[in-house]
Amino acid sequence: MANFNEQALTWLREHGLTILLILVVSVAAYYLLGMLTRTLSRRIQAMDGEEDSELDRRTKTIFRVVHSTGVVIIVSTAIMMILTELGVAITPVLASVGFVGLAFGLGAQTLVKDMIAGLFILIEDQYTVGDVAEIGGITGTVEHMTLRATELRDLYGTVHIIPNGEIRIVANKSRDWSRAIVDVSVTYEEDVDTAVKTLQEIGAAMAEHKMMGLLLQEPAVVTGVEGLEEWAVRLRIMVKTLPNAQWEVQRYLRRQIRLTFAEKGLSLAFPRQDVMIVGEPPQKSS
């Protein structure tokens, strides 16, 4: 028993303190990495003096990827050093990993492809955290991004995790500016010029609105008659907005169109069918 205690103390002196030091340094490196990334991110975001700007979103995205990659490096290095202190031969382990990696080379190719694609997404600034984008046929808000995958939350709250290597076409709906487009259908009995003038008045009033006016980048434009449908004349009003503001502007326009058209007695069209009964005998009067 005394011999065992002596051997344990000897092992603790020779290896235990080293392992403890490795753990302490790893934890310190983890927190230091977090502090550095947060501090640099805040300073870069403060350079333009704007909240939630394109620079802010891009900075957050890049530093999140840097932080997650740094954590992987710290943990991997700590594990390898601890295994060495425990007497585990690293060279055979690495050789076996290389053999397994060779055996599963096709699977590793997918991982490498995802990471390379993620790197190019960052370099080319295709999208950042907070952008609304259509990726792989799915539209939603980019919530998280790593070198391997992108997390996209759709309108219903579902989170889609898309490997970066599978992304072929990206439609960014938040880049620089957006456009609100509202189509209005009126009946053929209504005066088209009056309807167009009413839409122009609604667009001008929106620009003067204390809240909605801040979301616009250009005056609203009424393009005129965009289509002659079977049951309606289709008009269009559109306006250039701040990024991600198009949906709020469209909701405001639809509400104002409904209220203003009702005030002026202009009828909005709706699908209808006219049924004609042919060959029915005339009714005899009693």
Image (cartoon, grey):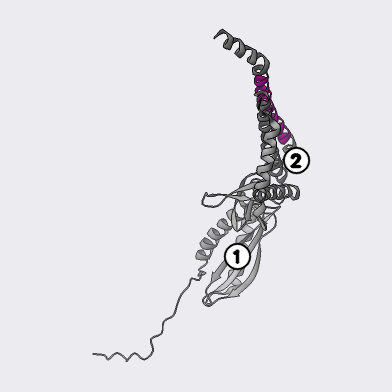
Q: Quadrant of the N terminus?
A: top right
Identify residue type, mark 2.
Asp
Relative to the observer, which residue lies in front, 166 or 251? 166
Q: Quick check: can you spot residue 84?
A: yes
Kind of residue sitting beneath label 1: Leu
Q: Is residue 146 visible?
A: no
29 within the magenta span: yes
Which stretch is magenta? Answer: 18-42
The secondary structure type at the circle numbered 2 is loop
Dot 2, how many residues are within 10 Å of its Cα: few (below 14), some (14-19), or many (20+)? few
Q: Name the residue under label 2.
A: 48
Q: Which residue is drawn at 69% across and 23% down?
A: 25
Which quadrant would residue 68 be assigned to in this image? top right
- CA gap, disc 2 and disc 1: 37 Å
Classify the position of the C terminus by image quarter.
bottom left
- Mark 1 lies on a secondary structure that is helix
